[in-house]
Amino acid sequence: MLSILAIGNSFSQDATAYLHMAAEAAGVEALVVNLYIGGCSLKTHWENMKGDLRAYQYERNGVGMGLVTLREVLAERAWDVVTFQQASHDSGLKDTYFPYLRELSAYAGELAPGARQFLHQTWAYAEDSTHPAFERYHHSQSEMFACLREAYDSAAKELGLPLIPSGELVQRLRAQGLGSMCRDGFHIEIPHGRAALALLWLKVLSGVVSPFSPVGADAETMEKIRACVAEMPEA
């Protein structure tokens, strides 16, 4: 069984919501856990780690199951994959990643020594987003994406970690005319956006492009998404 632990926020919630279903459709047995705090930054994860705080909503295959600490979840099983990500508002600011990411990675390495660690690259906001942090990027989607790509690439290189390039996939889908891919200017669209991220994660983590399509999805749109995911480089 492929066991995946995402340490994140609402963006990791978007990315993993359909992941267990995409895995099942591809014949891959998977357990997907997301540790959720809305808008949580790497600094806040680090503070929670230091204080051993029971601050995370534990989401198992998309279902919330109560509050937990980082320590108890990292130690609960032999995880195959552990992922980290920056909060979207800080995603393009290099100096917000360290020292927090380095210490979180080391902590996870101690408690889950057999897990492969990944950085989950988040995505840029929609062009018409009203998110207050969009001002940091001059209300420009292209500027935000360029900044976050550089920041994630730099952090990944420094720690020697592979990327799950969700932000890159979202930009490619936008370029193919699939709209903003956002439901509120920053969270990913449902169902196609969440399906796209699930397919990407599964491809990066297992090498499989799933035939999964969520309820209510448009078949033509899903074929475009599947083709784009298939073209994405593996970690």
Image: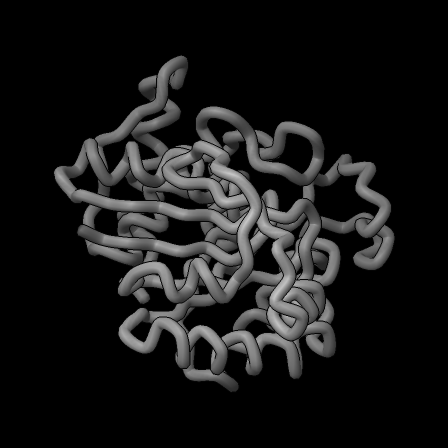
Instruction: Please name the residue shown 47% across and 52% down the image.
Output: 166
Q: Position of residue 168 (x, y in %)?
A: 49, 54
- Dividing the picture into quadrants, the one containing residue 43 is bottom right
Instruction: Please name the residue shown 67% across and 40% down the image.
Output: 186
Residue 225's place in the image compared with 15, above or below, is above
Residue 23 versus residue 50: which sits nearer the camera? 50
Residue 83 versus residue 192: which sits nearer the camera? 83
Q: Position of residue 45 (x, y in %)?
A: 63, 64
Residue 180 versus residue 79: which sits nearer the camera? 79
Quarter of the figure with the C terminus: bottom left
- Dividing the picture into quadrants, the one containing residue 38 is top right
User: In the rendered view, does 14 fall on the left or right side of 126?
Assistant: left
Q: Position of residue 206 (x, y in %)?
A: 22, 55
- Dividing the picture into quadrants, the one containing residue 8 is bottom right
User: In the rendered view, does 92 fall on the left or right side of 106?
Assistant: right
Residue 45 seen from this side = yes
Residue 96 versus residue 173: which sits nearer the camera? 96
Instruction: Please name the residue shown 65% across and 74% down the image.
Output: 50
Work out which residue is located at the far left of the displayed protein and give it: 27
